[in-house]
Amino acid sequence: RRGAAPDLTELLPQWLAAAARHGYRAPSALVPALLDAARARTDLRPQALALAGARGLWLARLNPEWRFALRGGAGGGGELPDPADGKAVARLWEEGLFAERVALLGAVRAHDPAAAPRLLATTWATERAEDRLMFLDSLRSGLSEGDEPFLEAALGDRSRNVRATAAELLSALPASALAGRMAERALACVGPEAVVPPAECDAGMLRDGVVKRPPAGRGERAWWLGQLVESAPLSCWRDRFGGLSPAEIVALPVAEGWAEEIHAAWCRAAVRQRDALWSKALLGPASAPPAAGPGTASLAERAKLLETLTERERAAWVAEFVRAHGLSEAFQLLGVCLVPWAGELGRAVVDALDAAREAGSYPWSFSGVMGLAERCLDPAEADRLEALTAAAQDPPEASPGAAAYWAEAFQRLVATLRLRGAMLAELAPPA
């Protein structure tokens, strides 16, 4: 039991994010405490380091316990040179700390996307493998066809992880040469009448990022097939299946029991290529039982698919899911929705919590969703929840004392929402 009082530590990430959003900087005297908090909680680090600013990075160089700040990507904010100043950029790239270089690469990428791979190329051959991987991963932001030559060259890197990341990024570019090679391989394996997985993992597949050895419990050929399908551009399937739409393709029977493998690979491709149309087809109607979904029954995969939709579409789909299936399976799906949960989604969550209370189970059966609601519900929902804070008689067949426990849980939820509302209002600049 957590009692009825709000848990302030759970609101720290929101407070820090709101403070950074409004351009605040931590008072100098509080920077050490801020660094201590970030050392203890990794979830606070990005926002805490942003609030600490250049002074936080300077202090981190003086105290071994704060050295984590030098390994992250928060390069110290104001210490970065103007991305248009080529000499200053080259000097910091050659001499800076790793965190400063990561931040510099991000700033250069934001200023001129094509300049980031050019900057990387100047020192690529001498970088450590783990650093090359981090730098390459930073190219996800703003990824475009202009990155293809650099990524294609990285397919020959001596590090397997670097090669795999380069292949993944190239497969997210449907017009890339790698995507074309993967499409040719995948189309040779999958058709309307039959599915024939590759017989071997040849040198070309290995260079294009296919991992040869499967995880425990997976067959080799199925493992290779999944990687080919997930790396092929989704546009190639329309012609393969006679011009059908994604929803029509997903609804087709898949030959010889390969449906789960093929649909899971399409899910990964839709997420990687940020294809909302395919994501909607693979999600299907939210009201349908998860096991009957057209693409995947996995809630983790559904959450990733939802992230490719607009915020409005995402909230509407999850609200329908909550209304149809309640909250017990909705935790991962709610986690990808825009905060605060307002409108249709907020109402669906409050109604589902009320329904769970009336069903007579204990509130800690929904502790994950309840904790998420404290951080994510629109503070305006507090007034609507007020009526649920009074203890009532246990419903027939309810667990003993459930009504009192629910009243306490709703009291905490209402108090937390009101505290969040006041916190955000105080941080907001005057109109």
Image: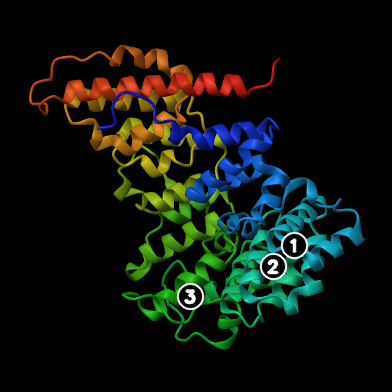
Residue 378: x %, y % from top left: 48, 23
Residue 181: x %, y % from top left: 63, 75
Residue topped by disc 3: 189
Q: Are marks 1 and 2 in contact (CB under 8 Å)?
A: yes
Front-lying residue, 136 or 292? 136
Residue 386: x %, y % from top left: 35, 13
The amino acid on which the numbered mark 1 sits, given as a three-letter code, is Glu
C-alpha span from label 1 to label 2: 7 Å
Q: Residues within 10 Å of mark 3 (few under 14, many from 20)?
A: some
Mark 1 lies on a secondary structure that is helix
> Left or right of 278: which side holds 76?
right
- Above or below residue 382? Residue 315 is below
Q: Quadrant of the N terminus?
A: top left
> Left or right of 307: which side holds 24?
right
In the image, which disc is placed on residue 257?
Answer: none
Q: Quadrant of the C terminus?
A: top right
In the image, which disc is placed on residue 145?
Answer: 1
